[in-house]
Amino acid sequence: MTDEEANAIATRHLVQNPLPHAAYRWRLTVGREFGDGWYFDYAFELVRSIPEHELEQFGGAPGFVVLLDGTVRNVSWSEHSARRKPNG
């Protein structure tokens, strides 16, 4: 799978899973090869200005993987941490 194909699938995944607040939208991050596919961080941006004391807090998976078969799966925090540890 090319990075362009992975980007298209990742974009579709984000569009199909909008954030619960209309003032925010997902922002596609740079994908990187991640074992069995391409990994993307979950990142969002403000669509309109919101006072700091009204900003929402979001939790959940750190990111997702676009698998070689075109499916998408979330990456858990423990898997994310394990993959980021240096070898040795």
Image (cartoon, helix red, strand yellow):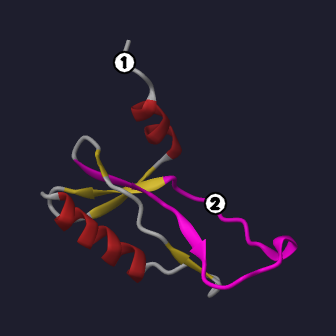
What is the span of residues highlighted in magenta in the rendered image? 37-62
Disc 2 packing (10 Å; few <14; some 14–19; many ≥20): few
- Please identify the residue farthest to the right as the structure is shown: 53
- Residue 54 belongs to the span the image colors magenta: yes
Considering the numbered disc 1 on the image, is that residue within a helix, a strand or a loop? loop
Image quadrant where residue 45 sits: bottom right
The relative height of residue 36 versus residue 40 in the rendered view (above or below) is: above
The answer to which of marks 1 and 2 sits earlier in the sequence is 2
Q: Kindly identify the residue that appears in the image at 49 percent across and 61 percent down.
A: 42
The relative height of residue 23 versus residue 36 in the rendered view (above or below) is: below
Considering the numbered disc 2 on the image, is that residue within a helix, a strand or a loop? loop
**In the visual, does 6 lie left or right of 39?**
left
Name the spot of residue 85 as percent of width and height, x first.
Answer: 45, 26
Q: Residue under circle 2?
A: 59
Q: Residue under circle 1?
A: 87
Name the spot of residue 54 as percent of width and height, x first.
Answer: 83, 76
Name the spot of residue 80 as percent of width and height, x first.
Answer: 45, 41
- Please identify the residue farthest to the front as the structure is shown: 49
